[in-house]
Image (cartoon, rainbow, N blue to C red):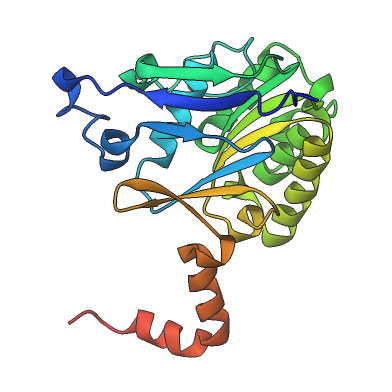
Amino acid sequence: MISERPYIKTVEFDRPESLSNSHPFNIPLVHNLKEIDFHKDVTFFVGENGAGKSTLIEAIAVGLGFSKEGGNKNFNIETTGAAVSELHQHLKFIKSFKKPQDYYFLRAESFFNVATYMDEVNYLSSYGGKSLHEQSHGESFLSLLNHKLKGNGLYIFDEPEAALSPLRQLTAVTAIHQLVQKNSQFIIATHSPIIMAYPNAKILMIENGNLVETRFEDTEHFQVYQLFFQNHEIMIKEAMKSPT
């Protein structure tokens, strides 16, 4: 039997020579990319700030028809004024024979703008019937996971852990798993070792300007947290020393 997932199998990158010295094509990650193969359930992008995770996530989302600020494909809000990079124009998507029935792009930095739009159009029933601005950032994100997203979907998240406590991150993992069991595919950029511990996911780590598939235990995030919890007093003292 042919699987309907992953809905997005592969994205191929075209790097025009005429733009090789301009943003974002001069970012090492973007410059070196040729293609990405996605997991049918969850694919993680992990790496340091500035390595290109959000640039990559935005290009994939916009290339698939989302607003750069997030939401589903019916949203077309422009409030930040920030320009979208040209990268999405140079992507080729290889898709499944079956389209997802649900879509959502969550961008933590602009979720406030999406929430404002939801209030303005009085479209709150899909978010638990309560204004997202009357909830904390973390609560509103969990409302999205638990009420808005229905399954059989393609969901793209950029740093969903931004407003979540460790316990709420575990709650988010539970919701993500329930949606995966309902034939959903996730593409997630994250710094959270709790979220990226989701089993059987594909973890793509940005390393020296390349995407490298890695095990959870081999990520810098896991290793730094493990080292910290084992040696927190020593590491805090070292971190508090005045620079020389």
Name the residue: 50% across, 72% down. Answer: 223
Whether residue 101 sits left or right of residue 11 in the image: it is right
Q: Quadrant of residue 83?
A: top left
User: Where is 80 relative to 234, above or below?
Assistant: above
Whether residue 14 sits left or right of residue 71 in the image: it is left
* Image position, residue 119 (x, y; %): 70, 19
* Image position, residue 197 (x, y; %): 65, 58
Res 50 visible: no
Of the 4 image quadrants, the one containing the C terminus is bottom left
Of the 4 image quadrants, the one containing the N terminus is top right
* Image position, residue 122 (x, y; %): 75, 14
Name the residue: 36% across, 40% down. Answer: 52
Name the residue: 81% across, 22% down. Answer: 126
User: Where is 230 relative to 90, above or below?
Assistant: below
Q: Quadrant of residue 170?
A: bottom right
Work out which residue is located at the far bottom of the displayed protein and give it. Answer: 234
* Image position, residue 77 (x, y; %): 53, 14
User: Where is 175 relative to 166, above or below?
Assistant: above
Question: Viewer-proximal residue, 104 or 237?
Answer: 104
